[in-house]
Image (cartoon, rainbow, N blue to C red):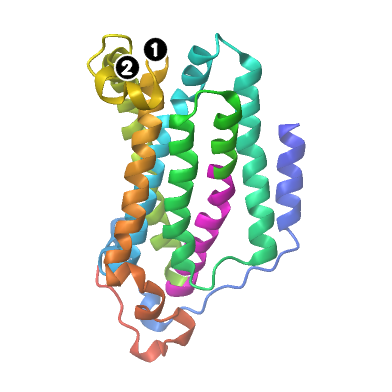
Amino acid sequence: FDIASFIIAIGSLLPVHIPQPVVSAEKQEKSSLLQDSLFGFKYILARKGLLGLQLAFFLINFTGSLIFPLLAPMILSQTNNNTVALGTVNSAFGVGGVVGGLLLSAWGGPKKKVHGVLLGMTLSSLLGYTVMGLAGSPLFWALGAFIMMSFNPIINGSNQAIWQSKVPPEMQGRVFSARAFIALISQPIAMAITGPLADGFLLPGMMEGGSLAPIFGWLIGVGPGKGISLLYLMMGVISAVFGLSAYMFKEVRDVESLLPDHDAIDTSSTVVVEV
């Protein structure tokens, strides 16, 4: 089945015409692999609005990589190893992603794409992570999972639209590679932290008589798996605060108007980042 899906995926791309960007004479000069690798990072660092958006995605990936590996332990430990409950929640993630994708296709996303990123991040965190942290039943875990993933296509689609409109096509490969590195480097860091954090601190802390139980027990209860619920709740609040706080910075809030679209720039006056 994997081979068949691979053939279908590649086959669907074969008839698609991919236009090659026009490269100016100054950009045709050969550069080293190191220069090309550093170019994307320098490009992003030189544009505070794009840097702010990229930091948002670093946080999204970091928080997601902290909590998603702990989803199964959280649910199974609080439902007496009910695998049906776990399967239901996992299915809700998938259905939410499909519904969000269909909604984005029909709607096209917000006119101001930065709202799709920052408000989407805020609402996804509050109605997704936080609900799952507060919940104690499969129904509300599934509801939080559905809402969280339904925002995912809107967040990613809006963000991609901004970057593709602002970064010249001949630079997108190098810049988008740097984007991917910044976003994805958070995952191994988070995965290295999440196990020791849960086992060594959160889970015992939220057991009866634990150090965290008197502080948070009234809100989410105490017992097996509640330490992971606390982590979901905390990551939801932190991500939502970050999403709203980004509006305080004009460079991020107005990134679409402050940075001109690449197709509106006269190539003769384009400023090239020196590497």
Q: Is residue 40 visible?
A: no
Residue found at the very far left of the displayed protein: 211
Q: Is residue 228 magenta?
A: no
Q: Residues within 10 Å of mark 1 (few under 14, many from 20)?
A: some
Q: Quick check: 190 above or below 80? A: below
**Disc 1 target residue:** 223
Question: Can you say which quadrant of the picture contains the C terminus?
Answer: bottom left
Quadrant in which residue 51 is drawn = bottom left
- Residue 166 percent across, percent down from the top left: 43, 74
**Disc 2 target residue:** 206
Look at label 1 and name its amino acid. Answer: Gly
- What residue is rendered at 44% in x and 58% in y? 119
Residue nearest the observer in this picture, 238 or 48: 238
Residue found at the very far front of the displayed protein: 218
Which stretch appears magenta?
Answer: 148-169
- Closer to the chain start, of discs 1 and 2, is 2
Disc 1 to disc 2, C-alpha distance: 6 Å
- What residue is rendered at 59% in x and 48% in y? 150
Look at label 2 and name its amino acid. Answer: Met
Q: Is residue 156 magenta?
A: yes
Q: Are marks 1 and 2 in contact (CB under 8 Å)?
A: yes
- Residue 155 percent across, percent down from the top left: 50, 56
User: Which element type, helix, strand or loop, lies under badge 1?
Assistant: loop
User: Which element type, helix, strand or loop, lies under badge 2?
Assistant: loop
Question: Can you say which quadrant of the picture contains the N terminus?
Answer: top right
- Prevailing SS of the magenta stretch: helix
- Residue 41 percent across, percent down from the top left: 30, 59
Q: Is residue 128 visible?
A: yes
Q: Residues within 10 Å of mark 2 (few under 14, many from 20)?
A: many
Residue 158 image label: none
